[in-house]
Image (cartoon, rainbow, N blue to C red):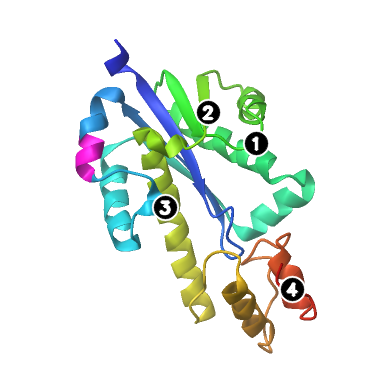
Amino acid sequence: MVAKRRVIGVDESGKGDFFGPLVVAAFLASDSDLQKLQEIGVRDGKLIADKKLLTIDKQLRSSFPHAVVVYSPEEYNRQYASIKNLNKLLAKGHARAIAAVLAKHKADLAISDKFGKSELVERALRERGVRIDLQQFVRGEEILQVAAASILARAAFIREIEKLSALLEMDIPRGAGAIVDEAGKRLARRPAFDGFNKIAKTHFKNYRRIVNPTLSLK
């Protein structure tokens, strides 16, 4: 009976990156599919090199039900300005991705990597009228459905960063460290630069350091 459970795994990418979107992915597979996921090479997306990850992502998207929610920087900034809490925004994204899968497929359980208070995602699901058993675990990526979701989310984030790099004609770094500050300052010095609202998460400390160079990296 347990082997026939249809489980939605959900995870995110981009929450710690100044540039680019926030991505949340939901991935549906039966527990009887776990061997196939292992054979494909599914594990925590953060531990897989980009080239291999993009290959696995393509296999997963062609073989399993899924949903990928991308909050563009502009949408992210608008939502964050209203909510002023990243975990609440993440919860909304998780609920949105789960709901998108359930709109077309049946599932017995949803599993999420745990962040913040458990009731955040539960409340976001209720607000969408979604009823499903939800479990949240620290290191949720150890569960293969969640690991698969982490791959889908990270692959989508990588593609968005590649698009942004092409648009801005420079390599856009990931993360939120000093190299990100330097890239931001180079962009800000461009005569026709249109600001950060459409390309970055402006509540990050990076933004304040970029627009006020006297601030130090802390």
Considering the numbered disc 4 on the image, is that residue within a helix, a strand or a loop?
Answer: helix
Q: Where is 76 relative to 65, above or below?
A: below
Q: Where is 96 relative to 51, above or below?
A: above
Query: Which residue is the site of mark 3?
Result: 46
Query: Which residue is the site of mark 4?
Result: 209
Residue shown at the point (46%, 35%) measured from the top left: 140
Q: Mark 3 belongs to which amino acid?
A: Lys
Residue shown at the point (64%, 22%) measured from the top left: 126
The mark nearer the N terminus, 3 or 4, is: 3
- Horizontal side of 137 relative to 180 (left or right) equals left
Considering the numbered disc 1 on the image, is that residue within a helix, a strand or a loop?
Answer: loop
Place of residue 91 in the rendered image (x, y in percent of width and height, measured from the top left): 62, 36
Mark drawn on residue 136: 2
Query: Which residue is the site of mark 1?
Result: 116
Magenta highlight range: 36-40
Considering the numbered disc 2 on the image, is that residue within a helix, a strand or a loop?
Answer: strand
Pointer 3 with pointer 4, Cβ within 8 A: no
Chief SS of the magenta region: helix
